[in-house]
Amino acid sequence: MATLPQLLEEDVQLLDDALQELLKESDATTALIIDQGGFLITYQGDSRQFDLTTIAALASGAYMASQTIANLVHETSFNSVYQHGEKYSMFTLRIDDECFIVVIFQAQVSVGAVKYFAAPAAAKIAAQLLNAHERDPNEGLDLSVLNLADPSEVFKRRSV
């Protein structure tokens, strides 16, 4: 089952633009879009000091764990997870049923500002993912079944 729509270069550019705007407005360090399986879709910001692939996988797991906790306290879901550190903090927000936005920011940056600017960024990203899905509703990717040793099935040219 496809969890991510087929994304064109223009789609990824719009996703990246939304992340860049979020970083500029919130003074965050790095922003990622990940799917619920923990796969990194795209990112903007500083990637030199962070292992973004591992962060994506673990952020997804932390978010999914929070959903289990939500059920235990009789909530249908929590839409975000905030983790505060001494140097850096991280905020994860659900974009849609399949994706999250993860924002890494210095601990002295206000989480309120990050939340405030992450919400419209998530809405822009959700709208673009929906546009991509509507463009070809029968196509898409299930990244959980991706053969990382041979991703050629994902990266192939369409016949004209």
Image (cartoon, helix red, strand yellow):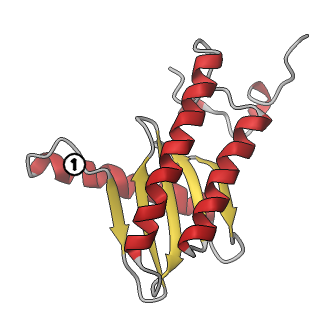
* Viewer-closest of 113 and 137: 113
User: Callout 1: few (<14), some (14-19), or many (20+) C-alpha neighbours within 10 Å?
Assistant: some
Q: Is residue 13 above or below residue 98?
A: below
Residue 98: % across, % down: 45, 36
Question: Residue, x 62% and y 52% (percent of image)?
Answer: 18
Residue 133, quarter of the rendered image: top right
Label 1 sits on a secondary structure element that is helix
Residue 81: % across, % down: 34, 61
User: Going by the image, does 3 lie left or right of 83?
Assistant: right
Question: Residue, x 69% and y 40% (percent of image)?
Answer: 148
* Viewer-closest of 59 and 94: 94
User: Going by the image, does 114 lie left or right of 79?
Assistant: right
Q: Is residue 113 above or below residue 15?
A: below
* Viewer-closest of 15 and 6: 15
Question: Residue, x 27% and y 55% (percent of image)?
Answer: 66
| Three-letter code, disc 1 | Thr
Residue 158: % across, % down: 85, 17
Q: Is residue 6 above or below residue 91?
A: above
- Whether residue 84 is visible to the viewer of this picture, yes or no, is yes
What residue is shown with label 1? 68
Question: For the image shown, how many numbered marks are present on the structure?
Answer: 1
Residue reaching furthest to the right:
160
Q: Quadrant of the C terminus?
A: top right
